[in-house]
Image (cartoon, rainbow, N blue to C red):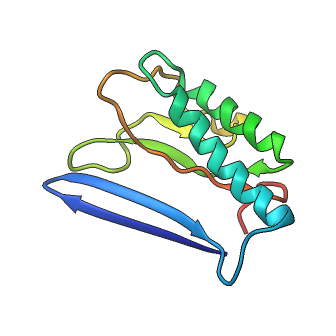
Amino acid sequence: MVSIDIGAHMDGYAALAGHTLIVGGTAKGRQADCILAAANAFKAITNLMQPGVNNNELTKSIEKVMKQYDCEPLTGVVSYKIRKDLIDGVGGYILNKAIPAHKPKDFDLAPGDVFCIDVCASTGKGLPG
């Protein structure tokens, strides 16, 4: 399994993308579950994103989809708000997995918000290696 991340920055605006590939075949079993959990959690939150939706609702949606695949969202991963000339640190984080000790500032999405969405799944306990 290979994860490819790419980014570009033009006139102060960033574009970021990532994709996971299976080298030499297709995913099966728990590997396929993990990839589907991340892909479908991504789709779920992007479908929910609209003005007025709370960031914590999006985190709950990620966790709910992951549970359907018996997977865990990876701890420490965040989706973040970006703007011209700044891709991180704007404020407005969406956690991949709710951690009571690391609760982000509560906010509702607003018109014109731009986010870098990062969703990672684990077949283990959701702890980074």
Is the N terminus in the top left, top right, bottom left or bottom right quadrant? Answer: bottom right
- Please identify the residue farthest to the left as the structure is shown: 11
Establish if 48 lies above or below 29: above
Residue located at (69% from left, 30% from top): 60
Is residue 94 rendered to the left or right of residue 114? right
Q: Quadrant of residue 17?
A: bottom left
Question: Which residue shows up at 70% across the image and 58% down it?
Answer: 35
30 on left or right of 52: right
How far across and down, in percent of the image, does residue 66 sit? 76, 44
Left or right of 41 in this view: 68: right
- Residue 96 at least partly seen: no
Residue 13 point in image, percent of width and height: 22, 51
| Picture layout, residue 22 above or below residue 19 | below
Q: Quadrant of the C terminus?
A: bottom right
Q: Residue at x 68, y 84 (%)?
A: 24
Task: State the image coordinates of residue 8 (x, y, percent, origin top left).
Answer: 28, 63
Residue 109: x percent and y percent?
A: 43, 23
In this view, the residue in front, 85 or 110, is 110
Residue reaching furthest to the front? 25
Furthest residue toward bottom: 24
The answer to whether 45 is drawn above or below residue 129 in the figure is above
Location of residue 111 (image quadrant): top left
Q: Nearer the viewer, residue 93 or 42?
A: 42
Q: How many marks?
A: 0
Which residue sits at x=75%, y=69%?
A: 27
Residue 123 appears anywhere in the view: yes
